[in-house]
Amino acid sequence: MGGSAIKEDVRTAAAAGVTAACLASIAHEAVGHGGACLAIGGKVTLLTATRFACDGGNIIVDAAGPLMNLVSAALAMALLRTCPGASAALRLFLIMVAALNLCWFAGEMVAAIFNEGYDQATIARQLAWPPAWKPVSAALGVAVYAATIVYLAVQWRQQVVMGDVPEQLRMRFGVAYGAATVSFLLAGASWAGNPLAGALEAFLTIGVAAAPLWLSLRIRAHPGSPPGSHRPLDHSRRWLLVAAILFAGFLLTQGHGIGSAR
């Protein structure tokens, strides 16, 4: 186990987390809300790491963000299932993409009962839902959290069956999660309109919303794991380069703010 620990590259784990966090925001805000806004002939007036506004928007635009979180998570889960021989870095990345997108979706469903600006709350107003939508939304959000934790626990155990060491999996997730949180906080703080509010929202969206995922890591070594089959997380210049380019571009564009209301 000591040799495996030496080979584990924390920089690559961090790159996987940063990339997953950036893509979760792009999926929700840019592709989801932004794509729907443009599709209906609206105009994007604000696009940041955690905020979006559309001139001419409607319920379709509001629903498109959460929907893209679910689509992104489903795609990552499908790739994870069909690529069992993928590298340790790619498997970690896919797990993080699925996890962060599902937690973004679940976290909003819970937080929407306290914040009228969240997507679920704006949808409820447009459809004139009765006040009962709030406990229902919170319950569904908790249910999605529970399902996500169970799903990830299965994925971690599957990695152990494939030969990975539980302690190393915990380290990989911890580094990836920490890097995702810090990078997203920096992205939020880069918003020209209100850096402090942007940083706080970014921290809540990734750092707090994804915190329950730690519960999925209560894994044990599988007795059938072949000795010496551990595939370490090796140093990858490609992952570091992708993360650096994506994060820099994200900071300078979506993080800084796009649109007349930025």
Image (tube, rainbow, N blue to C red):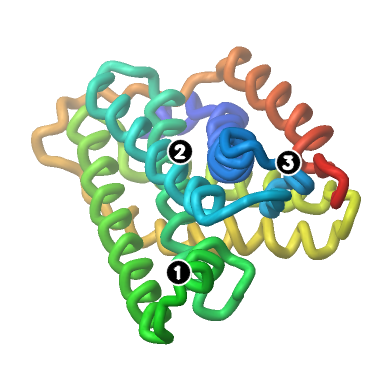
- Left or right placement of residue 67 versus residue 28 in this view: left
Q: How crowded is mark 2: few (under 14 residues within 10 Å), some or many (20 or more)?
A: many
Image x and y of residue 238, in percent: 60, 13
Q: Nearer the observer, disc 2 or disc 3?
A: 3
Q: Mark 2 points at which residue?
A: 97
Q: Which amino acid does label 3 sit on?
A: Lys
Residue pictured at 63% horizontal, 51% vertical: 57
Classify the position of the N terminus by image quarter: top left
Residue pictured at 63% horizontal, 68% vertical: 117
Asked which secondary structure carries label 2, the reply is helix
Residue 82 visible from this viewpoint: yes
**Compared with residue 218, is residue 127 higher up or lower down, i.e. above or below?**
below
**Compared with residue 35, is residue 88 higher up or lower down, i.e. above or below?**
above
Query: Across the whole image, how many numbered discs are drawn on residues?
Result: 3
Label 1, label 2: how far apart the Cα atoms are: 31 Å
Q: Nearer the viewer, residue 145 or 122?
A: 122
Image x and y of residue 53, in percent: 71, 52
Label ID, residue 43: 3
Report which quarter residue 98 is drawn in: top left
Report if the CB atoms under discs 1 and 3 are less than 8 Å apart. Answer: no
Residue pictured at 35% horizontal, 31% vertical: 75
Q: Name the residue under label 1.
A: 127
User: Disc 2 or 3, which lies upstream in sequence?
Assistant: 3
**Compared with residue 215, is residue 255 higher up or lower down, i.e. above or below?**
above
- Left or right placement of residue 24 versus residue 224 in this view: right
User: Disc 1 or 2, which lies upstream in sequence?
Assistant: 2
Q: Nearer the observer, disc 1 or disc 2?
A: 1
Q: Which amino acid does label 1 sit on?
A: Leu
Asked which secondary structure carries label 1, the reply is loop
Report if the CB atoms under discs 1 and 2 are less than 8 Å apart. Answer: no
